[in-house]
Image: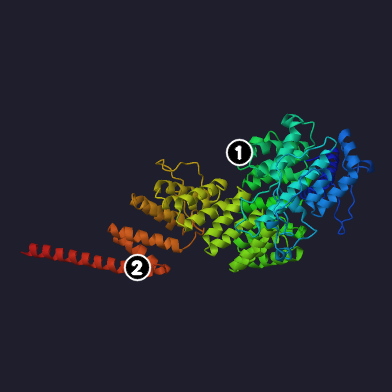
């Protein structure tokens, strides 16, 4: 994808205006994202170590503008008149004085009051950890609240009715005020939630500002023609409306307003992220694709959503490569590439990409918790220790840092310390979904099933596309022997990540526990096909062509083959024996010079089963062959020796019987 010089200049100027516009509205995360993209552009020369790069985009008159132009004369006039108050309101918001910020333009808001009986005790007031500094990422990601528990405040009494709005107020001022109210509600919600997984922590604790914000925004948009009128709004209030609609579970309507927002303000990355959170499947993404703006942001959004939905097609990698040709220094695009390889289970390439990302942007922590997951799975303890040290030196009060530390402690089997760090990550950000999932894994290790289930539930509440959390819920209920529940959650995990054989094996195991043998066999076979390079086009049970029939040389998982055979043994012993033989075939290479899996404990169990099966059919030679192999392999030796001894005794008895019969025949002949 090549852009002309005019297109490059236009894109660069649009990105800079987006940075300014987002900063004016305290959407710091979106501003940071746009600024990073701006500085990764091919024609932006920022290679100097001190950051004093030159801009070689066009002539001086086409150079980057350091201001945001409002082309609506009415709005521009209102913004000019409000400038001193806007600067003050934004300063209040930057200092986390959210109610004070909102009151600059909405002075009619009912102040928060509390009955005296509910006032916090002096001891609690003394434990305040409030700070005047806050993380910009917490401001913009919808649902993110304060980084820690602030000074104890009383439970507010919020009036849900719409705020009275003056017509002499710009959309910028209105957005800043309403956004401040939303953030104030998030801050109080976190304070009311208290400890992570405590009695007050959960869905019952809500942002009490949301009903009032919904009423206010609905009234504002209704007065201006609603969704049909695209000329009355700048797109920022549409984003805020879509966000609060999403929090109130009106997801279908939220999608419409967010789509309108990204069409009006395509460089507000926060709106794209909120829209992506509402897409649960590739079909959902396909449905909205025709309503997206036709620009480069739609391509970036497509790559991001595909990665979130675990789609690793050739087209996605091609699109990503085209985007990287325009933004070769983009850390975000490099991160998406690493995540795509990670979800495709191409661990080696994923690690190389993450290493490149870390070398080029050593202070950037975004997405590094996933890199720590990869290093945990491999496992690569030295690299994980190095990553944990680098993250701690950069910022130990980031959720990503605490997740990395939690993974490190989990790898060295210090699960209590791991839980402590995951809880710290959630104290910093209750909506940091990765920490909920990882904490659930640790509670599984600690056999605290109820806490694990609750952690996984919070994870899927934050992100319904996290198949690991659904799989964890299945594990938790399996430990409680609630197999119908575990089957449901395993099926959700398999539907989200259908390319992972582990998910289908779990579904098969759950079906087997529910005594649904046929379904279990089909799920296990799906796991075999997904986990191999075999063409899945053939339908199972069609009589002539089972795609598994000739798979040897380690192409299939012997454990799953063994499980399928056990399911067959009750009603079709011959089919069971065939799958046991197939499990044994994985030991050897498919062709001469190829290496198979070699002897494993599972293949030895399959060999023992076959030896018993052949013993029952009185096939002594095959039984002896299998039993002798077991004696050499070192597993199941005692039972194999017993079989050898028994078969030898039977063979010698048979030989004696034959000799006796021959002797009798000789005597009869002599007489």
- Residue 260 x, y percent position in the rendering: 73, 35
Q: Which mark is residue 283?
A: 1
Residue 618 sits in quarter: bottom left
Q: Secondary structure at mark 1?
A: helix
Q: Which mark is residue 639?
A: 2
Disc tally is: 2
Label 2 to label 1: alpha-carbon separation: 54 Å
Callout 1: few (<14), some (14-19), or many (20+) C-alpha neighbours within 10 Å? few
Residue located farthest toward the front when viewing the structure as drawn: 116
- Residue 24 x, y percent position in the rendering: 84, 46
Residue 566 sits in quarter: bottom left
Taking depth in this image into account, of 156 and 252 the one nearest to the observer is 156
Taking depth in this image into account, of 593 and 311 the one nearest to the observer is 311
**Would residue 2 appear left or right of 587 to someone viewing this image?**
right
Residue under the point 89% across and 55% down? 52
- Marked residue nearer the N-terminal end (2 or 1): 1
Picture layout, residue 619 above or below residue 282: below
**Would residue 187 appear left or right of 64 to someone viewing this image?**
left
- Residue 96 x, y percent position in the rendering: 79, 54
Q: Secondary structure at mark 2?
A: helix
- Residue 185 x, y percent position in the rendering: 72, 49
Tell me, yes or no, whether the two marked residues, 2 and 1, touch with CB atoms within 8 Å: no
Residue located farthest toward the right when viewing the structure as drawn: 60
Taking depth in this image into account, of 3 and 519 the one nearest to the observer is 519
Quarter holding the C terminus? bottom left
């Amino acid at each position: 994808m090549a852009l002309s010089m005019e297109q490059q200049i236009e894109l660069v100027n649009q990105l800079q205006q987006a940075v300014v516009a987002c900063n004016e509205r305290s959407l710091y995360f979106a501003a940071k994202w746009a600024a990073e993209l701006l500085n990764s552009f091919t024609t932006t020369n920022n290679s100097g170590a001190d950051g004093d790069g030159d801009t070689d985009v066009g002539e001086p008159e086409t150079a980057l503008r350091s201001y945001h132009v409002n082309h609506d004369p009415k709005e521009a006039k209102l913004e000019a008149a409000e400038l001193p108050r806007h600067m003050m309101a934004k300063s209040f918001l930057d200092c986390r004085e959210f109610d004070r910020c909102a009151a600059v333009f909405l002075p009619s808001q009912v102040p928060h009051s509390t009955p005296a009986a509910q006032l916090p005790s002096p001891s609690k007031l003394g434990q305040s950890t409030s700070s005047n500094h806050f993380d910009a990422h917490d401001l913009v990601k919808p649902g993110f609240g304060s980084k820690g528990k602030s000074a104890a405040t009383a439970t507010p009494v919020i009036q849900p009715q719409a705020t009275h709005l003056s017509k002499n107020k710009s959309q910028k001022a209105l957005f800043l005020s309403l956004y401040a109210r939303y953030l104030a509600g998030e801050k109080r919600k976190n304070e009311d939630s208290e400890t992570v997984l405590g009695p007050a922590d959960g869905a019952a604790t809500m942002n009490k500002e949301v009903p009032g914000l919904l009423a206010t925004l609905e009234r504002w948009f209704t007065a201006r023609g609603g969704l049909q009128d695209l000329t009355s709004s700048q797109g920022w209030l549409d984003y805020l409306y879509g966000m609060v609609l999403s929090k109130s579970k009106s997801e279908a309507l939220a999608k419409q307003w967010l789509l309108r927002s990204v069409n009006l303000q395509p460089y507000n990355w926060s709106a794209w992220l909120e829209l992506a959170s509402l897409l649960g499947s590739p079909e959902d993404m396909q449905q909205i694709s025709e309503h997206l703006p036709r620009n480069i942001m739609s391509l970036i959004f497509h790559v991001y959503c595909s990665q979130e939905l675990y789609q690793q097609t050739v087209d996605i990698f091609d699109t990503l490569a085209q985007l990287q040709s325009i933004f070769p220094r983009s850390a975000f695009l490099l991160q998406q590439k690493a995540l795509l390889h990670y979800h495709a289970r191409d661990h080696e390439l994923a690690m190389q990409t993450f290493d490149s990302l870390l070398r080029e942007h050593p202070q950037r922590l975004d997405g590094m918790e996933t890199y720590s997951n990869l290093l945990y799975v491999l496992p690569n303890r030295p690299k994980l220790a190095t990553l944990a040290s680098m993250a701690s030196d950069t910022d130990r009060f980031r959720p990503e840092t605490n997740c990395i530390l939690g993974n490190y402690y989990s790898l060295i089997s210090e699960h209590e310390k791991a839980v402590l760090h995951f809880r710290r990550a959630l104290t910093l950000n209750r909506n940091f979904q990765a920490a909920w999932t990882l904490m659930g894994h640790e509670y599984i290790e600690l056999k605290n099933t109820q806490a694990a289930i609750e952690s996984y539930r919070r994870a899927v509440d934050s992100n319904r596309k996290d198949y690991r959390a659904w799989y964890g819920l299945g594990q938790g209920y399996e430990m409680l022997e609630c197999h119908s529940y575990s089957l449901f959650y395993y099926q959700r995990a398999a539907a989200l990540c259908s390319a992972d054989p582990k998910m289908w094996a779990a579904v098969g195991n759950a079906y087997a526990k529910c005594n649904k043998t046929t379904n279990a066999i089909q799920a296990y076979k799906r796991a075999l096909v997904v986990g191999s390079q075999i063409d899945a086009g053939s339908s199972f049970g069609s009589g002539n062509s089972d795609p598994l029939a000739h798979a040897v040389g380690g192409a299939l998982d012997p454990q799953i083959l063994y499980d399928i055979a056990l399911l067959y043994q009750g009603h079709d012993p011959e089919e069971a024996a065939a799958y046991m033989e197939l499990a044994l075939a994985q030991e050897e290479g498919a062709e001469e010079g190829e290496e198979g899996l070699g002897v494993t404990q599972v293949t030895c169990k399959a060999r023992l089963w076959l030896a018993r099966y052949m013993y029952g059919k009185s096939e002594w030679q095959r039984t002896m062959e299998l039993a002798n192999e077991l004696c050499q392999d070192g597993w199941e030796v005692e039972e194999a020796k017993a079989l050898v001894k028994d078969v030898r005794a039977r063979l010698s008895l048979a030989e004696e019987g034959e000799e006796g019969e021959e002797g009798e025949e000789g005597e009869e002949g002599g007489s």
